[in-house]
Amino acid sequence: MWKPVRKLFKANRDSRFRVFILGPANSGKTTLLERLTDSPAGAAIVTRSGKRVKEVPKGNDQRGIHNIDDEITYASNPAFVFHDSGGFEAGGVEELEAVWKFIRKRSLASPSQQLHAIWLCIPTDNDRPFGFLQSGFLSQSTASVPVVGIFTKLDGRRTKVEIEVLGPRPSPSDFCDRAQEVDQKVAEFVNRLEARCWNERYPPTGFIRVENMHEVSEWSIASCDQLLQVTMDALPHETQRSLLGLTVWKRNRRIHTIYVLKRVLHAGAKGNIVVRTPQPVQDEESELHADKGFRILMVSEL
């Protein structure tokens, strides 16, 4: 079962899936990438022209748009390469022009440098999340590079709706009694945003909604899986889908193994053999899957 996957992985060892993540400042881009790659805060590796650069100190007011060509990777899964648009100011014509210049340049680049997908982050905790950046970007075609719309920070929108519906000091019973009303208002807000995007000249190929991405949970991992699936469905070429599939496979080996282990150990499933070892298995050729000191033999689907 794993031999064809390993063979493809070796053949594409030097190929990486390249994503341009676009959105205003504080739209949850960095948190999304950390959760997607199962990395702690501040673990990004930024390289410029092949050389690692120091991270800009927090509080520095420099705009990242000037470093749009920087490659952002994470040691937990270096098969992903990200480019960040940086923050956008209101009416940022200069920034938007830099975005289009970057997309055109990457469209003509060599296969190893080409852009595969664009993730457009729209923060829903903002009362006016759809502005110059979104409308300007969706007014032009990105050609063969698919765009996925990501409605981020739904937990922030939910908090605002709870205050609106329940008042500043709700009781626990208020949350239970009016939870459905809160959910409905949050959904209506995001539905309006999605409809606005669909009405643009070049709308995203697909959409997903994420919340509580700052927490490591089965919910946040499932949201990342959904993002990868929507991206996979949007890719126009089989070679790109295969490349993303290999990247996801490497990611899933690391992230999902611990959750499978927890389910196996909790359920005490018969017929499964679980052996604890001091160190994770590092050999790519091994039929074993490992993470965080566990080695798994014969884990069936639960």
Image (cartoon, rainbow, N blue to C red):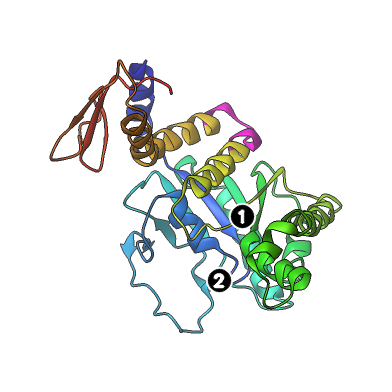
Label 1 neighbour load within 10 Å: few <14, some 14-19, many 20+: some
Residue at position x 63%, y 69% from top? 24
Where is residue 127? Give x, y as percent: 75, 72
Q: Mark 1 or 2 closer to N-term?
A: 2
Residue 39 can be seen, yes or no: yes
Q: Quadrant of the N terminus?
A: top left
Q: Tell me: 254 left or right of 110.
A: left
Q: Secondary structure at mark 2?
A: helix
Where is residue 270? Give x, y as percent: 31, 18
In the rendered image, the vertical position of residue 28 relative to residue 148, given as above or below: below
Magenta range is 232-239
User: Would you say the residues marked 1 and 2 are in contact, meaning their CB atoms lie under 8 Å apart?
Assistant: no
Residue for badge 1: 103
Q: CA distance from mark 1 to mark 2?
A: 13 Å
Checking the image for residue 229, the label placed there is: none
Q: Is residue 235 shown in magenta?
A: yes
Residue 23 can be seen, yes or no: no
Q: Quadrant of the C terminus?
A: top left
Residue for badge 2: 65
In the rendered image, the vertical position of residue 88 relative to residue 113, given as above or below: below
Query: Which quadrant of the structure image shows residue 296?
Result: top left
Query: Which quadrant of the structure image shows residue 168?
Result: bottom right
